[in-house]
Amino acid sequence: MVCAQVPPKLAPLPRELEFKRGERFQLVCSCREGEPPLSFSWVRDGASLVESQEVSVRRFDEFSSSITVTALREEHSGNYTCIVSNQGGSDSSTVRLRVLVAPTWLRQPYDMSVLSGVRITLNCETNGTPKPTVTWRRSKGFNLQQMETLTATQWRTGEDGSLSTSAVKKEDEGFYSCEVANGVGEGLRKTVRIEVQVPPAVSVTEAERIAKKGESITLRCDVTGDVPLTISWGKANRNLPLISEDRIKIQEDSSLENSSSSVIIRNTAAEDTGLYICTARNTYGQQQATIRMKVVEQPSTPLNLKVFEVWCKSVRLKWKQPYNGNSPLTHYIIRYKKKESLTKATETKVLASQQSAVIRDLRPSSTYSFQVLAVNDVGASGASSTVFAHTREEEPEAAPTNVHVKSKDSAGFLLSWKPPPVDRWNGDLIGFSIGYKRVSHGSTQSLPFTYKVLPDRLRLAEAVASPSVASASREFEVCGLQESSSYTVVVTAMTRTGIGPPSEPVLVKTSYGESPQDPTVSLLSTEQNQVTLSIQDTGKKRVSPTQYMLHIREGSGHWLKIPLSPSKTEYKVGGLLSGAQYKLYVTARNGYGDSGPSDVVAFRTETESAGSSMFQYEEEDMALAFYQKLSFIIPVAVSMTIILVVPIAACCCLRKLNTLQAPRPDGVESRGFTYTPSGSEPPPRPPPRPHSMPPPVTRRATTDEDPKHYSTLQNYGSVIPPNDPRFSVFIGDGNKMLASQVVDLPPTATKTSC
């Protein structure tokens, strides 16, 4: 029969034991249960314990075992396990041994003298159990009596207790103390001295400065560093200030902490442009800072301005880029205007990258002046030298104006017009083209124009200088047309380059007959209140006039019209003012139209004290009744009035006026002289009549007319009887008409016939 053994069981051991370094350590392991034989063994940190001089294992009896360490060291720390076993089983118990060690130095801090701005590390690495704690303290300056715990954020404490900063500063100078403790024995403490050497540091507020030429400018640099400091300025490998440059001055301002130095330049010039160097030196090194200064000014004048190409309405200019004044050009300005024009020049901008430009929208055949200016941020340069360009001619842009038919006959007509507006000529006019074609009513066939060229020479420059040249009328007589036919007429102006647009078409119809030729007027004699003149018809007999119209004015007064009978050639015009200046001309009329005006005749009446009475004229060889002559009528009228025969004389005069009244030509009122104010030229011909024969003459009643108007003279040469009640009123009104009706005669028009 076999009995089972009781397994062993160890007495409890402490979980952790702490001993100081150098102390003796003994651990006893005993079995309180279990049957022998018992077997004991020791394990350290999982490995069988090896005995040595310092470590020994002893067995007190068969129920216990112990280990002894004569002098503990750090390496004796660990987990010690006691194992007991028999045939019934085994048991074990573990104790953690911790050897306490006071702090010891691994790396100590030391005194340092470093340059400002470098990275430094203050060592404070120690060993001990438990792990020591490290505390850093610093002084203010180099005063050991004022130590305080370090709290500056620029300092960092490492895991090993070291203190470091990435860039040490001058204010970091002083004493630093490293204090180490772990509660075992006495702690450690080490104080070191840190000196920070500051080399010069130079700074400038602006690395680039710009000054306008002639201004003053100050260049400043600020310097920090250990004293003594030396500051100097240089430019282009030369020290400043130069002895010869009185306008350049250096000024320094120093304190315990900072220093500054300034270069003051008065009346800056272009040669002051450059790189200025501020250099600072002390025992620990040197440093430089630079300021680039640029003296700017207005650019210089653009060079070699030339006219490269010329067209009718545009010009191409070229020039060379000038000195930009040390500041980039922003653009160019081109000024141009017509030569000798008093208006402000036109300006146009051109990109700075261009050295040529096309100026557009110019007038053809015009001379222009051009200048170029360069512009930068400072301002504009002076204007370049002036160049001139004369644009090419072009055909006229406008048609002739005031195109009308002045007179016509059965075989042609006289056409009048004025040149186009001067600003639309586009060059010198070399002539006019007159185009006409017959209008075929009821026919679908379009007839071609026949053109006649009227050579002329109108210089644009003269027309601009003298507007009267451009406003003078031109005339052309178109001949060889068919009677009673309608024609369309146009006029165009010409330059050397082409023909301009045609005028508005004018429709004219030739007549069956012809209007009279221009009459010829000659002055025979002048007296105090009258003038004697001769009118000659220069036309053919079949175109003889049926009436003359005398146009007369005093000085610059209005033109007055007086109808005359063409039966005689010599006439007297009375009722004039003595010593007055007069002008007159004559036109002729028949049933087919009016002639043109005769030459204007100027004359002055003889001087007398008394004024004249009225306009009157006599036909020299006309046989008048004796009672129609003033020399007889006035005394007889007075006598008959006295002897009460006034009623008889009045009846006779009235009967005579009614029986001798002649047909009135067109343009004459039934009472009084008719006059027509006509600007500055003789009145134009009236439009042609639609029939070949003149219109019938109609007689107007005179009984209810205004008493201030008077009948036309019956025979265009008779004298009003003195007993006529209109006599005294007519004398005053006639003088008023001469003095108040003013119309200027035109200049003689250019007339060309076919």
Image (cartoon, grey):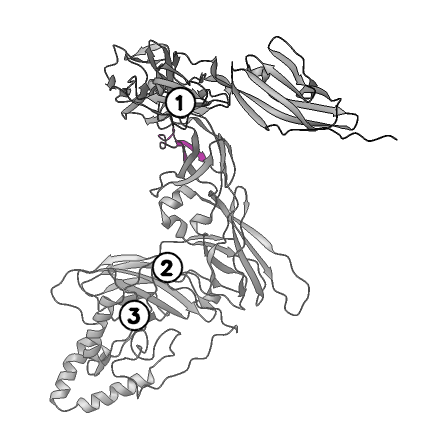
Residue 514 in picture, x, y percent from top left: 49, 65
How busy is the neighbourhood of tag 1: few (under 14 within 10 Å), some, or many (20 plus)? Answer: many
Residue 186 in picture, x, y percent from top left: 42, 18
Where on the picture, by quarter, is residue 192? top left
The amino acid type found where label 1 is placed reads: Trp
Quadrant showing the N terminus: top right
State how far apart marks 3 and 1 are (Cα): 149 Å
Disc number for residue 576: none
The amino acid type found where label 2 is placed reads: Ser
Q: Earlier in the sequence, mark 3 or mark 1?
A: 1
Kind of element beneath mark 3: loop
The amino acid type found where label 3 is placed reads: Glu
Residue at label 2?
598
Comparing 585 with 260, the one in front is 260
How busy is the neighbourhood of tag 2: few (under 14 within 10 Å), some, or many (20 plus)? Answer: some
Comparing 264 with 296, the one in front is 264
Disc number for residue 619: 3
Where on the picture, by quarter, is residue 505? bottom right
Residue 443 visible in the shown view: yes
Residue at label 1?
136
Residue 248 visible in the shown view: no
Comparing 698 with 714, the one in front is 698
Kind of element beneath mark 1: strand
Residue at image coords 41%, 82%: 698
Residue at image coords 28%, 75%: 718
Q: Earlier in the sequence, mark 3 or mark 2?
A: 2
